[in-house]
Structure formats: structure tokens, C-alpha cells
Amino acid sequence: MIPAKDLTIRECKVSEIKSFIEDKHYSHSINGVKISYSFAVEHEGYLVGAVLFGAMSTTAWKRFAQNEYEVLELRRLVLIDETAKNSESRVIAQCLKHIKQTDSTIKVIVSYADPLYGHTGVIYKASNFEYLGLGSRDKGYLDPETGKTYHSRALRTKYKGEYKPFVKRLREKLEQGLLTPITLPPKHCYVYKLHNRKDLYSK
């Protein structure tokens, strides 16, 4: 077992961790993620984890701040099973410290735990995030060809005003009736305030 104190966390290029996330994370994808910060987690020079922070999809940021540039969402977090149980909280803490030191405009970090995959947010509680409760149920789509489930937001996400290629493919499949509509369970919502301001978000 790799002790949490022996892990090294550093900001990196997305290309350094893309294949690792696609292999190890339950989503097996970073498509649609608007990436602002990417971190590699290493042990003795070997990649053992990865973290992505990025802008929230659509206008969800309005719940948490006055400006979308004040909010980041923890979009991907994955560590290999051989890391100790407290590794996630240590990694998150180091990432938040780096973001706070790097960009003073970021005020709040948001993260969601998805019950669809058996997640309740235990690691966020251990990382001193505040629990805001469950969101509302939402619409999603199942792609029978790949077995993957996509949130409806995935089909609306644009980058620099344009749909990414994978979004275009999903929208084409939807138009062709090749995606199965499903109801997604509400997610657990957690927030971490980088700066102690009471007006950052409202419950």
C-alpha cells in the first residue's frame, strides 16, 4: 500500500493524464470537460492518479457565485487501488492549495457525487467540503452501442461556441433515435470555499 504522504502532486498537461483517466476512471472519458487545471499524482516517478478541474457545464455556476469565473468544478478524480485510504483527501487538499495560490479569482470549488455509480461523497466530507444536499432528477441518454450513459448537458456543451466532435456524434445519434432516454438520479452536491465569503452561494 502506498502511503498518502509519499504521493507527489503536480500540475501537468492534460495529455499526460488523458489515457490514465480514460482507463481508470469510471466514466472512461474526458469528453465534454472544460479543463482549467489538470494534476498528475505520482509515486516514485510513476503515475498513480489524476485530477481535473474545469468550468461547470451550462449555467449551473449561477447557484454558487456572481460570476462563472469564480467557480470551478472538480470534474475527475481517480487514484489506483494501491494508494492508502486517506490519499484522496490529501490529493484534493494539495490541488486546492495550488489553485488558491495560482488564481485569486476562483472563490468556490464544486463537486458532485453520483449515486448512479454508488458514490455518496465520503471523500469530499473528509476534505472539509460542505454538503448542500441532493440536486433534482435529470434527463439522460443511454447509448446501447457503447453501454455508456450521458447527461443531457453533454449534448448541449459547447467549446468556444462550437460542439465538440463527440457531441456532434451524440446529437446525430439522438436525431436518428439511437439513444435511449433515461431518468438520472439526483447527485449529491458539495462545495469548498477557497475564500471565506458568505455571499458566494445560496442553498
Image (spheres, rainbow, N blue to C red):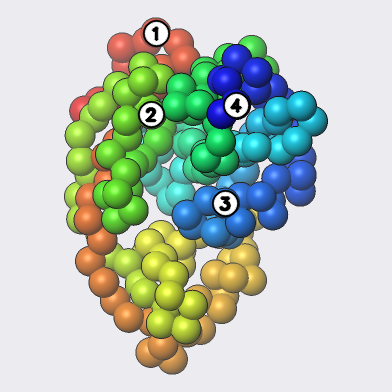
Q: Splitting the image into 4 quarters, where does residue 132 fall?
A: top left
Q: Earlier in the sequence, mark 1 or mark 3?
A: 3
Query: Do the residues under discs 4 and 3 have CB atoms within 8 angstroms?
Result: no
Circle 3 packing at 10 Å, graded few (<14), some (14-19), many (20+), is some
Mark 4 or 3, closer to the camera: 4
Estimate the x, y position of residue 153 in percent, counting from the top left: 41, 60
In the displayed orientation, state which residue is furthest to the bottom.
Answer: 176
Mark 1 or 3, closer to the camera: 3
Query: Do the residues under discs 1 and 3 have CB atoms within 8 angstroms?
Result: no
Circle 2 packing at 10 Å, graded few (<14), some (14-19), many (20+), is some
Estimate the x, y position of residue 190 in percent, counting from the top left: 32, 30
| Three-letter residue code for mark 3 | Lys
Identify the residue shown where x is 40% and y is 35%.
111
Q: In terms of depth relative to the viewer, which is nearer, 49 or 30?
A: 49
Q: In terms of depth relative to the viewer, which is nearer, 6 or 72?
A: 6
Residue at label 2? Answer: 123
Distance between mark 4 and mark 2 Cα atoms: 18 Å
Quadrant location, the N terminus: top right
